[in-house]
Amino acid sequence: MNNGGLDGLEMLYDISVLMGREPEIEAALKLVLDRVARGLGIIRGMITILNRNTGEIAIAEAWGLDGSQKNRGRYSPGEGITGKVIETGNPVTVKRVADEPLFLNRTGARNGEEARDISFVCVPVSIGAEVIGALGIDLPYGPGPLDYEVRILTVAASSISQALRLHQIRTEEMEDLKAENTRLQAQLRSRYGASTFVIGNSKIMRALFFQMEQVSGTGATVLLLGESGVGKERVAQAIHYGSPRADKPFVKLNCAAIPETLIESSLFGHEKGAFTGALARRKGCFEQADGGTIFLDEIGELPPAAQAKFLRVLQEREFERVGGNLTVTVDIRVIAATNRDLRGRIAEKKVREDLYYRLSVFPLVVPPLRERKTDIMLLAGHFLEKFSAENNKKIYSISPRAVNLMTSYSWPGNVRELENCIERAAILSLDGTIHSYHLPPGLRESRRGPGGEERRQTLGEVLESVEKELIAAELRRTRGNLARAASGLGVSERVMGLRAAKYGLKHGRG
């Protein structure tokens, strides 16, 4: 045993300097254990920490233990020597661990033969009266007492207490985040099925939901086809969160939004120095999505040079980073989407034919909004609730005139255009109702001709439409009281009566 007082003071001084100099908590604790090992000649050492949320004691840092041994070192307060120290706040010495029934050897580091020649010293790490962890060491067995080691470790424990408190807080926060993530993922699986990510109740959408549910539980590659704005990304999300990979990453990349010179780096990553500006190794989207799903939007815009490497990933699930020769293997599910005619792109030599067939394992067509008219108001109601909450406004209804305009419009921008339309209307509404005059001018000016074709309304038609809706809304608000309605709109009762008669609106006298 080491009884050198000067050596002990030097070791404690070094520990104090280390704690003040090293900003990284984990690195500082490792250096402390290393200094204790050199100063006391220990066989192994460990700093344990109490998680106040779970009540579990785990090894925060260790010296002389491998990763699996460190992970096995878990206790409850009062369990074993370490648990007893943390529960009571008192140091414990064990002269020979083989003779101590409370010694659990939970890490498995001490075999039976070695245990006869090992002593163990464990002291609490405290903040005030609260024990937050423990510092324990294995020493070669010797005949003398262990008082010196207890004193040295007690001072060392005091030096690391603030750092261990920060480690404790961070560990607990990480556990909270993991628990919250698990809860949210379970909530996503239970609440966010296909029909929640992608809203619709039309026949064509129910057929799509059925196909999505069929493919979600598999690992098949999915190709989503449809016009811009139909919600292909939300379909991809629904498939991912309805799959066994729901608790793994969902990584998305728009192939058309990345410059051709950077697309390979974005997909496959790069090594340090692979090109100008590559200052460090970077993981690409495929590595980031390992274990989960990668969603590649606008896949038809993928440059030909990247298509060959992408085809290999689809077939072999392996690739090399840009500038590297190390083969990276990933476990991913691929969902691709396009609004282009891929067969036409094949004819133009813009898309590889073998890539197209490899992508088209399970094609799904997401219909445009004009083909599911019965879903328009269902979607509008969803967006109205969303933007009412975001803008902290109470909007309860959509006027009949606005409903008529919305359901007769062709929505060339699809669901995205409808969402933008409702967001604008929610901002403009002042009376809790979306009126036709809150809708974009292009939508208000559109009207069906005799043959069903769309035509623009004249200025007079637009003005009459807005006037009729304003008068009707005010009469509804005043329960048909003509005088009050006239006052509300700032016109005379006579003018109000003439306008109401013109539009065939019922009313009573004030």
Image (cartoon, helix red, strand yellow):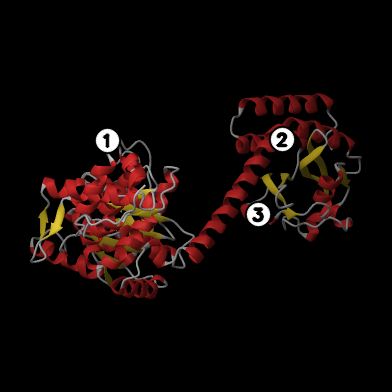
Distance between mark 1 and mark 3 Cα atoms: 41 Å
Identified by mark 3, the residue type is Asn
Choose mark 2 or mark 1, whichever is in front.
Answer: 1
- Does residue 331 appear anywhere in the picture? no
Choose mark 2 or mark 3, whichever is in front.
Answer: 3
x then y, percent, for residue 395? 41, 49
**Badge 1 density bin: few <14, some 14–19, many ≥20, Cα 10 Å:** few
Q: Quadrant of residue 259?
A: top left
Identified by mark 1, the residue type is Thr
x then y, percent, for residue 239? 38, 66
Q: Which label is found at residue 38? A: 2
Q: Which label is found at residue 276? A: 1
x then y, percent, for residue 387? 39, 48
Q: Earlier in the sequence, mark 2 or mark 3?
A: 2
Which of 191 and 457 lies nearest the eye of the viewer? 457
Q: Earlier in the sequence, mark 2 or mark 1?
A: 2
* Residue drawn at (41%, 63%) of the image: 196
Which of 490 and 428 lies nearest the eye of the viewer? 490
Q: Which residue is identified by label 3?
A: 71
